[in-house]
Image (tube, rainbow, N blue to C red):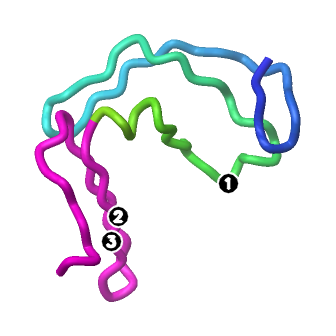
């Protein structure tokens, strides 16, 4: 069973390894299949991964860029730029 904003659902659980472009890897991560209502997403990244490193998302000239690194190296604060 998986708990979510719409309640709970019975879902399939898989164990995966995620390999990042910088060579870091997260092994043995348990993930669940999305329900039919969430089919518009390829993947949803949760805090269990985000809290392992630094995450930045920008949208310059209408082009989105997602950047993530493990381990965390510095505080990123766009309000002080």
Give the structural element (helix, strand or loop) at label 1: loop
* Residue 65 lies in the magenta stretch: yes
- Residue assigned mark 3: 58
Give the structural element (helix, strand or loop) at label 3: strand
Foreground residue among 58 and 71: 71
- Residue assigned mark 2: 57
Range covered by the magenta-colored residues: 53-81
Please provide percent x and percent y for residue 20.
Answer: 25, 35
Q: Which mark is residue 73?
A: none
- Residue assigned mark 1: 40
Q: Is residue 16 left or right of residue 25?
A: right
Query: Count of labels shown?
Result: 3
Q: Is residue 20 left or right of residue 63?
A: left
- Which of discs 3 and 1 lies nearer the camera? The answer is 3
Please provide percent x and percent y for residue 66.
Answer: 33, 59
Q: Examine the image and state in which quarter residue 16 appears.
A: top left
Number of other residues with Cα within 10 Å of mark 2, as a class: few under 14, some 14 to 19, many 20 or more:
few
């Amino acid at each position: 069973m998986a708990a979510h904003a719409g309640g709970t659902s019975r879902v399939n659980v898989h164990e995966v390894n995620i390999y990042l472009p910088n060579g870091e890897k997260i092994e043995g991560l348990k993930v669940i299949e999305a329900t039919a209502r969430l089919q518009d997403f390829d993947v949803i990244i949760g805090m269990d991964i985000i809290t392992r490193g630094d995450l930045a998302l920008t949208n310059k000239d209408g082009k989105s860029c997602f950047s993530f690194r493990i381990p965390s190296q510095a505080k990123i604060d766009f309000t002080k730029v």
